[in-house]
Image (tube, coloured by chain):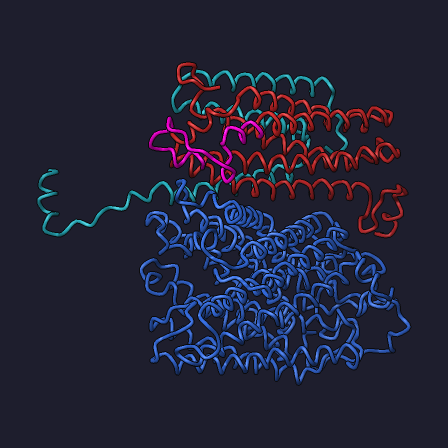
Amino acid sequence: MGDAAIHKSHSAEFAHQFEDMEQQREAGSLGMWVFLVTEIMFFGGLFACYAVYRALHLQAFELGSRLLYVRFGAVNTVVLIASSLTMALAILSAQTGKRKSVVMSYLVLTMILGAAFLAIKFTFEWHHDFVEHLVPGFGFQIRPEWGNVSNQVPMFFCFYFFMTGLHALHMIIGMGILTVLTLMASRDRFNEEYYAPLEVTGLYWHFVDIVWIFLFPLLYLIGGHYAMRGGH
Amino acid sequence: MSTAVTDMQQASPPESSRVHYLNANYGIKSWLLTTDHKRIALLYLGSITLMFFVGGAFAVLMRLHLIEPQGALVEPDTYNKLFTMHGIIMVFFFLVPSIPATLGNFLVPMMIGARDLAFPRLNLLSWYIYIVGAIFTLYAAISGGVDTGWTFYTPYSSGFSHTQVVPVAVGVFITGFSSILTGLNFVVTIHKMRAPGLTWFRLPLFIWAIYATSIIFILGTPVIAITLFLLGLERLLHIGIFDPAIGGDPILFQHLFWFYSHPAVYIMILPGMGVMSELVTCFSRKKIFGYGFVAFSSMAIAVISFLVWGHHMFVSGQSIYAGLIFSVLSFLVAIPSAIKVFNWTATLYKGSVSYQAPMLYALGFIGLFTMGGLTGLFLASLATDVHLNGTYFIVAHFHYIMVGGAVMAYLGGIHFWWPKITGRLYPDGWARFAALVIFVGFNLTFFPQFMLGYLGMPRRYAVYPAEFQVLNVLSSAGASILGVGYLIPLIYLMWSMRYGPAAGPNPWGAKGLEWETPSPPPTENFEEIPIVTEEAYDYANPPRAVTRG
Amino acid sequence: MSGHVVPVRTYISVFLALLALTGLTTGVAYLDLGPVNTIVALAIAVTKMLLVILFFMHVKYSSGLTRLIILVGFFWFAILVALTLSDELTRNWTPVPTPWGLIFPLIRGLL
């Protein structure tokens, strides 16, 4: 009985440990969700430490946060949200049997937006912070206006760089996967029946977007940027 | 129809003509590029056995050193490296992967009537990741070692130790992904690929145990990964989040570390408990007492294990209020383990018990795990832990569970499924002898350590007061017996692979889908995917005959 | 997600909602609401996350198992945060032992 089911599927993409394509697709999706749970716990460790130190050293965190550029954080948030949209549209176009050029265009657009995010982050933010001596371990300079929490401000910046750095690493990996998918699309691998790799990569990409959705307020918007206190 | 297993049933005609997973392809590429879960299980078996003996070698050196109060063998700094490397290798490279990566990989698809795991290539990748992690760690061991203890406590590890902390942290970090992928594979496979008729409550309890273990792999391992990553960064950058100079808290490291490492100890014991359910039922020819209780207790252990980590930190400077919460929760986690012990014992009652080697290991487990578990209660209680923490009492407690429990279950499982895995029978007389040697050697090694701890001898010390020498010498003597005991199975099991008599599909007369296929199994596991109509361990009805293929 | 096709219109609406919420959270940061700032920021972030999860990640059309897995992930993160904070925030609560001789005057003083 089981063997008849195995021969049910003639798709070139069928993997023989499964009964049919449906089981294969469900397993792939379930696998990616389970992997995302591991990512929740991986980033979660950092977020938990952030919660502890923000509670213990709120003033230092506020001082540090006000030295970040909200405009770049906000623009990057918009860029990532747009990339999630283009990713969803890439999957939709495969699902609805559009030509491969449509699927590829959306994938490439997603990568362009991802690259824009990284460019803004590394050149306008990180580089600027390095020049301003705000990178712990790389010439960090305590500023006199920080007063009696001066020694704790580097802690904020440790979190800033570790969290956005880990996030950026995940984006880079995502873009690598998107490159592979674009190549696969160019070889007509995807159609209405088979688009599981797109779906599963989409889940990953959206997850990375969600991490940033939390990083933006938690890193950039602490302590308020009220005009009278002089933030960016 | 319940008859005791008296003799291992001889096989029929030679299977040299039959194609199975071992002879389907030859050559090193067919092994190193395999995606067959059974071959991957054997790749793991070889690597894990190697790491076991490396970790054991460190233990031998430690016990030799400790026969003299002022230390007999090495400098104190070297001793620190010995116990650290022993712990790291035994925990991360032996115990954590042991049953899941070997028996789990081999048996999960077979027990659920599937042809392989959900993601065979990820399975192979997870082995390679394990190997890379092991190489980093072994490199660190031979280029100076690490002296922080396997617990890597900050600030010593992050700022003061001059040893190879970063390579080892990288090695353990990498190996963590091996666990994660294995756990992910098992969860998806068990959810999605069960044979027709195999409902959740007909699954063998080994599968429930592996499932619960996989949940811990998935939820816990990423946290130690990020922790070691942060530790490595702090060491390299000379600044980091555990550094008090910038308002950091070294105890936060301990929270993150133990959030994984406590559930990790349940990773190490749960699969063994799963093996126990299989052994106790087969060698009593009886269905398990209280299937539902055993299944749910596996899940309860997996969940509650995440709520108790602070009991490792009672004397670290942790708040006493947190200590109270963790203490209460730690008493709670003992309950499901106890339930299992009661259920195995009740299964034995009025069963038709036979005493082949796997059963000897199982019986040893019941006694030794119970002792280890009960001594854990002294440690869960805040007041007594203050006196016992940091002493040999702790060392004895966890070795009773890890070695008296987990390793015995591992050996019992290896022996039980050996005929299935290799198609050969091992010499049961030698196996029983080795089991007894191990039992005696184990107790002689570790029982004195309870006494040493209670009397106040600190752990991780290279020297000790002269009044403790007798107990230390007894412990070292036991260790030498235990070492010999572990070498004996290595010899006869390897011997059996070439010279052992051929095994039939079901030499033990056991129930379970894995016994309904030839030994060794064909690459695709089953000629036809079976349809399940029975409950698990239905020993009232005889096992199904196997159609030889 | 089992082949469920979400209309483009839905995706665009979700996208616009996400943009609006991003603007909102940025704007609110420039108002002084004290501790409420943090609560509002987190509430908006959670809302954005739910939109992404339900629509972009198709969880609205997914099985109960998928939803359970997501809930488990967040719950476990919550365990890590809650129990760690139960230590970090209560370190200074440990009372200083009071000598017996001072207890009775203390009680009398309270009555």
**Residue B514 appears at what percent x and percent y?**
74, 64
Q: Which residue: 80% across, 62% down?
A: B31
**Residue A206 appears at what percent x and percent y?**
66, 31
Name the one closer to the observer, B297 or A185. A185
Q: Which residue: 57% across, 34% down?
A: A164
**Residue B469 appears at what percent x and percent y?**
39, 81
Where is residue B246, by image quadrant?
A: top left
Tally of numbered discs:
0
The quadrant the N terminus of chain B occupies is bottom right
Q: Which residue: 62% across, 82% down?
A: B432
Where is residue B166, by image quadrant?
A: bottom right
Q: Is residue B304 visible?
A: no
**Residue A133 appears at what percent x and percent y?**
49, 31
Instruction: Give chain A's shade.
Output: red
Instruction: Give chain C's shade.
Output: cyan
Q: Is residue B249 above or below residue B24?
A: above
Q: Is residue A111 left or right of residue B332?
A: right
Q: Which residue: 38% across, 45% down?
A: C87
Q: Which residues are magenta?
A: A127-155
The blue-tinted chain is: B
The quadrant the C terminus of chain B occupies is bottom right
Q: Is residue B340 left or right of residue B180?
A: left
